[in-house]
Amino acid sequence: MTDRRRNLFVLLLVTGLLIGSLVVLTQKPTKLGLDLQGGVELVYEARPSPQSPTVTQEGLDRAIDVMRERVDQLGVAEPEIQRSGEAQILVSLPDVEDQDEAIEQVGQVAQLAFYDWEVNVIGADGKPAPDDPEVTGGPSAGNAGAISLYEAVLRAKGRPAKVEKNNSRDTSLFYAVDKDSRRVFDLGEDTRAEALQNVPRALRGKATVHEVKPDTVIVRAEQPENTQSDRKTNRWFVLKDDVALRGTDIKNPEQGFDQGAGGSGQPIVTFEFTDKGRDTWQDVTRRI
């Protein structure tokens, strides 16, 4: 083969490769990064707690699984969720439609706690009232007796601090509120500065930050599954933070269906107790 023919062959080969590459590129959708198509990038850092004194890799993996399930519910295309360093999780959500909803849903800290309801629900005077159905809800516990989040913050802020072993947390939470609109701008932050960051700039001069001290928690009334954030009802309760049983006291939770004799066929969750959880459950139910 002469040099001229060899060069012509190479040129034709390169041309063919270029044409083939162009065909592939035109048929395959281009994936844009956050800087081009927009979106949100979230960084979460795991911290020790009284219930989990150390950050474990198993705990991080479980957190990533939970976040992935929440992201799937948002319908975000091609999200990226990965570990970053020893205790951080990086979440990239390209082209997300509602960034505020994404931040709220992905970043919620899920904690399971069982309370003895009547003796812990706080009334208008800042104290439990186990015999008052106006406070506990009586037969309609968890529904009747609920108040707005704004009223709950005002009720909770006046309670004294008390740190005990059965508290779900041993630090304060801070809520930024606007008195005129009775609006609460967040669901509790670790510092006053963080709470104010959730307030629109135009309202920061009017906002007040209230501290809810340890031994008091604010909980939301049960909502139907998959209820969107903007459709959740504004029904809240203030509880004395005396946890009877923790999520760490159960194991092997599984979703199933009520298939027993006369069962309704409705979804249920079954679980087993740890050794400590079994003893705690026995003590709690005997006391109640």
Image (cartoon, rainbow, N blue to C red):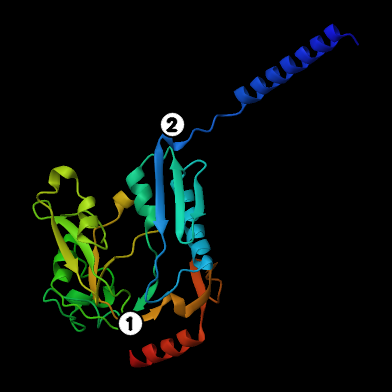
Residues 194 and 106: in front is 194
Q: Percent x, y for residue 125?
A: 11, 76
Q: Amino acid at mark 1?
A: Asn
Q: Which mark is residue 4?
A: none
Q: Mark 1 vs mark 2: give the one in front.
A: 2
Can you say whether 243 is above or below 237 in the image? below
Q: Is residue 115 among what the camera can see?
A: yes
For label 1, the SS is: loop
| Disc number for residue 36 | 2
User: Would residue 130 be found to the left or right of residue 259 on screen?
Assistant: left
Question: Residue 110, located in which quarter of the rendered image?
Answer: bottom left
Contact, CB < 8 Å: mark 1 with mark 2?
A: no
Figure quadrant of the N terminus = top right
- Tell me the kind of residue under disc 2: Leu
Question: Based on the displayed image, in which of its 4 quarters is residue 247 positioned?
Answer: bottom left
Q: Is residue 136 above or below residue 103?
A: below
Which residue shows up at 22% across the image and 80% down it? 162
- Position of residue 287 measured from the top left corner of the image (x, y, whole percent): 34, 92
Q: Assess disc 2: are there few (<14), some (14-19) or many (≥20) residues with their C-alpha within 10 Å of its C-alpha.
A: few
